[in-house]
Image (spheres, rainbow, N blue to C red):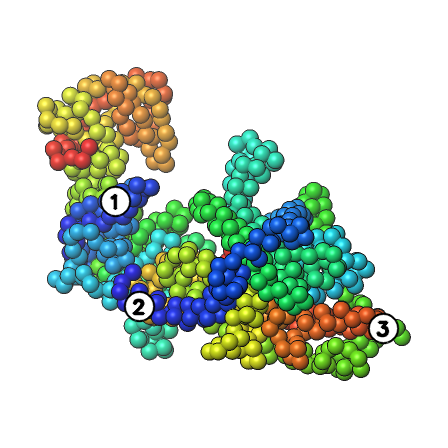
Amino acid sequence: MLEIEGVVVTYAAGRDGKAVRAVDGVDLTVADGEIVCVLGPSGSGKSTLLRAVAGLEPLAAGRVRRDGVDLAGVPTHRRNLGLMFQDHALFPHRDVLGNVAFGLRMHDVPKPEATARAREALARVGLAGFEGRSVRSLSGGEQQRVALARALAPEPGLLMLDEPLGSIDRALRDRLVVEVRELLVRLGMSALFVTHDHDEALAVADRVAIMHAGRIEQQGPAIDVWRRPATRFVARFLGWNVTRLAAVARAAGGAGAGPVAVRPDGLVPDPAGPLAGTVAARTFRRDHFLLRVDVEGEPLDVTVRGDHVPAVGDPVRLTVDPAATVVLGTLDSE
Amino acid sequence: MTGGARVRTALLLLVPVGFFGVFFAYPIGSILGRGLAPGGSVDLTPLTHVFSDPGLRGIAWFTLWQAAVSTVLTLAVALPGAYVLARYEFPGKRIVRALVTVPFVLPTVVVGSAFLALGFQPSLGAILLAHVFFNYAVVVRTVGGLWSHLDPHQEEAARVLGASRRRTWWSVTLPALRPALVAAATITFLFTFTSFGVILVLGGPTRSTLETEIYRQTTQTLNLPLAAALSIVQLVAVVALLVGTGRAEGRRATALGLRPSAEVARRPRTARDRAVVGANLVVMAALLGTPVAVLVARSFDTPGGAGFGFYRALGSVRAGSVLFVPPTDAIRNSLVYALVATAIAVTVGGLAAVAAARTRRRVVDGLLSLPLGVSAVTLGFGFLIALDTPPLDLRTSPWLVPIAQALVAIPFVVRIVGSVLRSIDPRLREAAATLGAGPARVWREVDLPIVTRAASVAAAFAFAISLGEFGATTFIARPNHPTLPIMIFRLLGQPGAQNFGAAMAASTILMALTLVAVLGIDRFRVGELGTF
C-alpha cells in the first residue's frame, strides 16, 4: 500500500528564482495489486509526482508512506520500486540483457538466476532473442519495451510508469496497453501509471486520478470518473461539453445551479429537440462524425452516427439525453 | 549536496590541489616575485622596460598580430573542412578525420622541420602557414564536433520559412555554432600567441615573440628579471583573453537541438555536394598531407640515394657536435618521460575532473585550464627559478621533466574526462538508483565504465602531448638527458646536410610514435561533443 499525503514539490524557475509548485498538495493511495493511473495534460506535474515517490525529488511538504512506513530518509535505491522513465534512460554502455539484468544484480541475485529472469522479462515484452543487441540499435518502441522489462525484472513491490507507451505507434500501443495490464494483474503488482492519453488511462487503470496544475481534481474508479466528471476542467479534459444553456441544465436536473456537462453522444439530432443551432464544422472519426454545432453562440460537440449527417451550415435541432449529463460541483478550480 | 558528499569531493580534490599548488602556483608565484620585486622589494623597472623599449614593444605587437592573423586564416581554411566532415558521409571519412588530427598532436619542432623540409626559408609566411597546419584540427574537432550534432531540421525549418541559404547560415547555423566557434578561436589564438617551437624554427634570427624572447633572455642574456616581466605581460594578456571569452561563452544559449551525428551526416548527392567535399579533401591533402609526406621523404633522401643512412646516423655522436648523447638515447628518454607524465596527468587530471563534475562549478574547470593559458615556456621558466632551492631542489631530479609535461597535458585530460562525465544523462543514474543501486554502486556501474573509456582517450592525448612537449622541457631537461624534440632542435641548429637529414629522420620517428598514440584516440572516442 502506497500512501501519498499532502505532497508538495517545488522547484526554482525563471530568472527571479521564484519557486514553482509543480506538485501542490496531492493525496493519493495505491492499494496492493491496484493499478492507479494519473491522467493529465503535459505540465500538470504528473512526472514530478512519480519522481517524488521514487525519492528523486525532495518533498517541500507532505509525506509518502509504503505499508505504513514513512519513506522520508529512505534513499531511492532502498525503496523497492520500479520506475520506467519516459525517455527510457537505457544504459548505452550495456546490451539489452545487461540493461534488464541490472536491477537483479543490484539486489545480489546470483548471475545464472539473474540472466534467466532477465530473459524471462524480455520474453514477456516480446523481445526474446534481443539479449545481445546494443540498445542504440533499437527502435523507439523496442527501447520502450526494454525499459519496461528492466523495470519489471526485479519484480518491485510498486511499479511506476511515466508515459510508458508514448513513442509507440497507435496500433501497437492499443495492443500493449492490454498486455501491460494483463501482465501487472498476473504478477499481482501494484502500479502507478502516468499518461496524458485518456483512452490509455481508462483501458489500463482500476482507478484514475485527474491531475491539473499540480493538484488532483478528481479520483475514483475509471468508469465513475468517465461517467461523472466533477469539475469543469475534468469534464473538458475528457471531451465533455461544459455549458450553462438552460435546456441542458433542465435535462441534467440542475437548473439555476452551476454549469453542467454533457457528453457529445448525449446530444442527439431530433427535429423536435429543444436546442436549435447551426453546424459550424464536421469531422469524420472512424465510426462516427463529430459535429461542432453553434447554439445561441455557444459551440457544442455532438457525435452523430448513421447515414444522414447534417452538412456544415445546415440548421439542426438537438435533444439532450439526461443520462449523459452531470451537474458540476461547486468544488472547481476554474 | 550532503555533508558526506562534500567531504568526498574535498578528498578527491586534495591530490590535484596539492599538485597544482607545488608545481604550478609556486613556480608562477616565483615568476611574479622575480618580475615585480627582483631585488626583494617592489621594483617595476623590468616591467616598464617591456613597454618603453621599442624592440620589446615590437615583439609584443608582433606576437599579438601574428596570432590574430593566424587565427583568422585558420578559421577561414578550416571551417569548410569542419562542415564537410560534420555533414557528409563518404567512404574513408573516419580515416580522414583521424588523419586531420595528426598535425595537432605533432610536436611543434616537427611541424617546423616539416616546413623547412618543404623548402620554406624562415619567414612570416612559413610561420602563418605552419600555424594553420597545426590548428586546423582544433577548428575541425571543436566546431565540427558541435556541427555534426546540430539538428539539420532547424536549418530546414528556416529554409521552409523562406530564408535563403545565406540567411539560414547567418541567422540559424552561425548562432548555434557560436559557442564552438568562440572556443576554437580562443584556443587557436592561445596556441599561436604562445607559439614557441614553430617560431624558433621558422622565425629566423629576426622574428621573435614574447615566448621566444623569454627563452632568449633566460638562456642567452641571463636577464631573469626581464624574462619574468615578459612572462607577466604574457600571463596577463592570456588570462584577460580567457576571462573575456569565458564570459561570452557563459551567455550562450543552452537549448540546442542536438542529435546523434549518424543522423546528421548524409552522402553527397548533387554535383554541388561532390564539389564541396572534393575541394575540401584536396585542401586537406595539400595543406596537411604535403609537409608530412615531404618530411618523411627527406628523411630517406640520403646523398647516396634513398636509404636509412640518416636513421643509422642517429645511433652515434659525431666528433665536434654539441649533441652530448646519441639521438637514440633521446628516443628512450622521451618514451620514459612521456609514460610517467601520462600516468601523472591521468591520475591528477582524472581526479580533478571527477571532483569538478560533482561540484558542477565552472570555477574548478577554469582553474584547471589555467596551465593551458600559461605557456609552456613560462612554466618551464617558473620551474627553473622556483624549484632550485631547498626544500624543493629538483634541478637534477628525473621527475622534473615528466611533471612539467604532465602539467601541460592535464588541462586536456580534465576537458576530455570532464566533458564525458557531464554528458552522462542524469536519468541514467536515477534509473540505476530506482533499480536498487546505492550512490557508490551507481558511480561504479554508470560513471566508471564511461569514464574509463574517456580516460583511455585522455591518456593517449597526454602521451602524445608529452612526447612532443618542447617549450617547458627545453628549460629543465638536463643537457645529457635530452628528449627527442630537443634533439631535433639541436640537429636543426647545426650546419650540414647530414645534420638536417638526421633531424628529418628523428622528426619522422617522433611523428610515428605520436601517431601510434593518436590512432587509439578515435577508436576509444565515446562519441560525444568535440573535446578540446
Closer to us: B119 or B370: B370
Q: Where is the C terminus of chain B found, in terms of image quarters?
A: bottom right
Closer to us: A179 or B305: B305
Say what amino acid the circle numbered 3 marks: Thr
Residue at x-position 74% and y-position 64%: B113
Q: Secondary structure at mark 3?
A: strand
Q: Residue B437 shows which numbered tag?
A: none
Q: Is residue A250 left or right of residue A17?
A: left
Q: Position of residue B137 (x, y in %)?
A: 63, 56
Residue at x-position 54% and y-position 60%: B35
Tell me whether circle 3 and circle 1 mark residues in contact (CB < 8 Å): no
Q: Residue A19 shows which numbered tag?
A: 1
Say what amino acid the circle numbered 2 marks: Val
Q: Nearer the viewer, mark 1 or mark 2?
A: 2
Whole-angstrom CA distance, mark 1 to mark 2, is 29 Å
Q: Position of residue B356 (x, y in %)?
A: 40, 62
Say what amino acid the circle numbered 1 marks: Ala
Residue at x-position 20% and y-position 45%: A24
Give neighbour class at mark 1: few <14, some 14-19, many 20+ (Cα, 10 Å): few
Tell me whether circle 3 and circle 2 mark residues in contact (CB < 8 Å): no
Q: Secondary structure at mark 2?
A: helix
Give neighbour class at mark 2: few <14, some 14-19, many 20+ (Cα, 10 Å): few
Q: Is residue B8 left or right of residue B125?
A: left
Q: Which callout, 3 or 2, points at the residue further toward the start of the chain?
A: 2
State the residue position of label 2.
B7
State the residue position of label 3.
B302
Compared to residue B138, the image places residue A226 above or below, namely above
Q: Using the image, name the chain to which the residue with label 3 belongs.
A: B
Whole-angstrom CA distance, mark 3 to mark 1, is 76 Å
Q: In the displayed orientation, state which residue is furthest to the right.
A: B304
Whole-angstrom CA distance, mark 3 to mark 2, is 63 Å
Q: Is residue A177 left or right of residue B514?
A: left
